[in-house]
Image: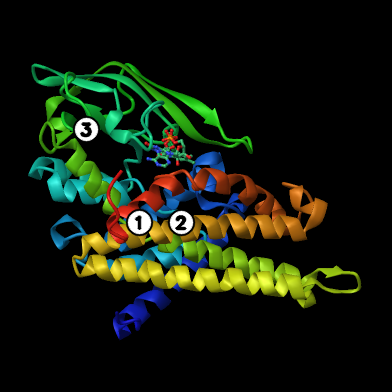
Amino acid sequence: MDFNFSDSQRELKTELDDFFAKAMRDAPPEYLGDTLEATFGSDSGWEFYKGLKKRFAETGHHIMAWPAEYGGRGATIIEQLIFEETAAYHGAPLDRFGVGMFGPTVLLYGDEDQKKVILSKIASGEWQYCQGWSEPNAGSDLAGLKTTAVRDGDHYVINGQKIWTTGAHRADHVFLLARSDPGSRRSAGLAVFNVDLCLPGVEVRPIRYMNGVHLYNEVFFTDVRIPASERIGGEGEGWKLTRATMNFERSGVGRFAAARRQLERFIAYLKSTRRNGRPLAEDPLARRKLARLWTDMEVGRALAYRVGWEQHKGNQVFSAAAASEAKILGSELGQRLANFATEIMGLYGQLEAGPRAPLGGTMADAYQLCMGFNIAGGSLEVQRNIIAWVGVGLPRV
Ligand SMILES: Cc1cc2nc3c(=O)[nH]c(=O)nc-3n(C[C@H](O)[C@H](O)[C@H](O)COP(=O)(O)OP(=O)(O)OC[C@H]3O[C@@H](n4cnc5c(N)ncnc54)[C@H](O)[C@@H]3O)c2cc1C
């Protein structure tokens, strides 16, 4: 792998650093903490995100890896990683569901009409998507889902329930995985649908996370009628499409860039806080633990770029296992950093807000959030199974 950026990639990085540094000066204080929480969990964070999406619609940065005919620049996955890494380092929100997941799926499997409408609405920032996959009894075992989409003339009628749907209360569309053949089992008989959340029969109910923030939802579908033209790909092809969606942006580079940002802030805290008459930065235990976290962050970043590089070369088998490695490393890094920071901050580390809360309470928040992030996008146990099977070559169980 070539670890060096080309001249044009270096220029892009400088341009993006400048763009995001300036843009984030106007961000509301929620963006000091977790970006996802700031975006979906507060009105001011949501308004800021919408404004940023409009600016991206002008610059085209966010869809640079799309083909030129759909507004992109035909850039490579490495440029896309540079964009995502830079945004995450500055704590800037990106459209991970529309631009990151559903858009590339529509590019691959949508018909020409679907591409024209859906891709232009994502690119312009007008439509916000959420991901309608998990159900109360179908998370790791996604193929066991029960939501049905039954054909009725020119329409499908949808019935069922989704859960943990991040940002559904802000979104206007969902990419839905449902059973188009109600008699089918497991991954056969599934299809993907583009569903307008404003249709009659859709109900979004909040799930409050343990820190009180509203990010997640249950979404209920009762006799929701959608035109048959909203099915992406064929009937029975839902599993194939969903596996493709899972493969988009799996490198996790944003996780390591966000960790770098958190670590830099934490280092500033260690340097400026005195304990027993000397700065915490001189404490041997703190130094040792910090060095370990920093090393893991650098290793994770290299791994994330390696995943991108292999995907760029079309090596999907390697990249699936390596993406799981990066996910485990990144999730556990976030958890260990939050544990260490709140531990060394002592009782102050539990304060979520107020003048005595170190780093604005962001570490107390991270401590609670990291548990959910270990599960979101596939639990760590499931990632380890993927490494054992795809990466190491052990039998699939
Ligand atoms: C913060 C957060 C955000 C999310 N956002 C979304 C979203 O936007 N859209 C969406 O569709 N879903 C979303 N999810 C759902 C997420 O994809 C599922 O929670 C996840 O796949 C786990 O499924 P589950 O909750 O049903 O747990 P289960 O699958 O019931 O797992 C329970 C436990 O059993 C373990 N386990 C399960 N199967 C195996 C196995 N084969 N081998 C070993 N251990 C196993 C798991 O690791 C876990 O510890 C989100 C979840 C969280 C926590």
Given contact means CB atoms under 8 Å apart, are the residues at marks 2 and 3 in contact? no
Question: Is residue 229 found left or right of 260 in the rendered image?
Answer: left
Circle 2 sits in a helix, a strand or a loop, which is it? Answer: helix
Q: Position of residue 129 (x, y in %)?
A: 34, 40
Could you tell me how far apart the alpha carbons at marks 1 and 2 are, in whole angstroms? 10 Å
| Camera-side residue of 390 and 367 | 390
- Does the beta carbon at disc 1 come under 8 Å from ligand 1? no
Task: Give the number of the mark in front: 2 or 3.
Answer: 2
* Disc sitting over residue 193 in the figure: 3
Going from N to C along the chain, the mark reached first, 1 or 3, is: 3
Instruction: Name the amino acid, label 2.
Output: Ile
Circle 1 sits in a helix, a strand or a loop, which is it? Answer: helix
Could you tell me how far apart the alpha carbons at marks 2 and 3 are, in whole angstroms? 30 Å
**Quadrant where the C terminus is found in the figure:** top left
Q: Position of residue 363 (x, y in %)?
A: 67, 54
**Quadrant where the N terminus is found in the figure:** bottom left
* Residue occupied by mark 1: 387
Residue 174 in view in this figure = no
Going from N to C along the chain, the mark reached first, 1 or 2, is: 2
Task: Give the number of the mark in front: 1 or 2.
Answer: 1
* Residue occupied by mark 2: 328
Q: Ligand 1 is located in which of the four quadrants? A: top left
- Does the beta carbon at disc 2 come under 8 Å from ligand 1? no
Going from N to C along the chain, the mark reached first, 2 or 3, is: 3
Q: Position of residue 151 (x, y in %)?
A: 13, 19
Instruction: Name the amino acid, label 3.
Output: Phe
Q: Residue at x 78, y 77 (%)?
A: 282
Q: Is residue 372 above or below residue 26?
A: above
Q: Residue at x 35, y 33 (%)?
A: 172
